[in-house]
Image (cartoon, rainbow, N blue to C red):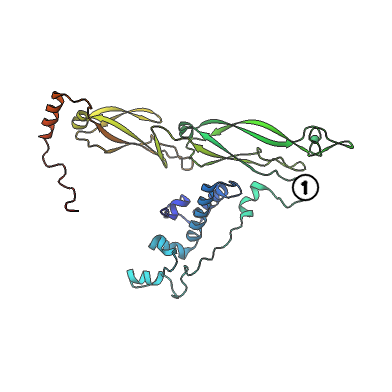
Amino acid sequence: MKKRDYYEVLGVSKGASEAEIKKAYRRLARKLHPDVNPGDKTSQKRFQEIQEAYEVLKDDEKRRAYDRFGHAASSPGFDAESAAGYGAGRGPFPGGAGSPFSNGTFESTDFSELFGNIFGGASRRTGPERGESATGTIEVPFRDAVLGGTASLSLRREKECPTCGGTGRVGKNVCSTCRGAGRVAEDERLRIRIPEGTADGGTIRIPGKGGPGVRGGEAGDLFVTVRVTPHPYFERSGDDIHGIVLITVKEAYAGAEIDVPTIHGTVRAKIPTGTQGRQKFRLRGKGVKNPRTGETGDHLYTVRIAIPTNRTPAGLDAATLLDSLYEEPVRKDLPKGL
Ligand SMILES: [Zn+2]
């Protein structure tokens, strides 16, 4: 797999300030932390990815070297000084030997700081304790993920026993409802709001739907991972949506106005004169609204020229006539003698 750009990984611009980078990292770390997504391999990988990106971008020197040399800067054996010397005659690191890439020391990040407000203080033994967080997965249709919608999720949750109030006892006896456990399992159906622009693998946090609190503590949160069902026609790439549109030979040759399906509905669009197969066109603002930036991506459609599949003498005449119109051989720019 090709290594992604560190700025892209954190979703920040090349000119992002230290504070912006830190903020982006913390937001992603909260979302992708393994405690929040137990057993989710994709989140795990993403989590490692953001860790790595942050280790480099938070450090002035490492960031500068990365800006200059890219991922090569952090690969084993890379010598920033000689690499810089090769290009510009001078190393970027005063003092020479202190290349920041000589070893792979990673500072540990204090996750209790990140998660303090989510998981509550688990170490307090006597006071109320917040319930554990729970995870779940829902499958969401493409359309609902892009435009927003609702989904329902069935889950079995533990709740405080209503008979004994969680103590496990009624008077001197063991509670008969929960048999002393203080908790009972209950099936629950949740309606979940899917925010507009939700991406495959995204997480929705539902407060208070995790495990029950202890000694009067609040219930934990439920983290639901969204799996977006692929669409038979549309394909999403970031905030853009792609589709294919068939046109006739005449529409390609003479130009036309056609209906292009987008997730927001049909859009009337111009096909310019002399359009070639596989040409790509863009309908601005007809893609996915990014929930973070509030900006909407585009709809991109690729043109395919459909040729009639029936063979008739008239068709052959028309094709022969078309053939005589090329000003140059169509394959003249292909490489020769390979
Ligand atoms: Zn009970």
* Secondary element at image label 1: loop
40 relative to 266 in the view: left or right: right
Front-lying residue, 75 or 30: 75
60 relative to 165 in the view: left or right: left
Q: Mark 1 points at which residue?
A: 127
Q: Where is residue 296 in the image (x, y as percent from the top left)?
A: 41, 38
Ligand 1 quarter of the rendering: top right
Residue 67 visible from this viewpoint: no
Front-lying residue, 112 or 189: 189
| Residue 105: quadrant of the picture | bottom right
Q: Which residue is painted at 66% across and 47% down in the image?
A: 119
Query: Dot 1 surroundings within 10 Å: few (below 14), some, or many (20 or more)?
Result: few
- Which residue sits furthest right? 172
Residue type at numbered disc 1: Gly
Q: Which residue is painted at 47% across and 59% down in the image?
A: 57
329 relative to 146 in the view: left or right: left
In the image, the residue with mark 1 has its CB under 8 Å from the nearest atom of ligand 1? no
Q: Position of residue 314 (x, y in %)?
A: 13, 23
Q: Which residue is painted at 61% across and 54% down in the image?
A: 111
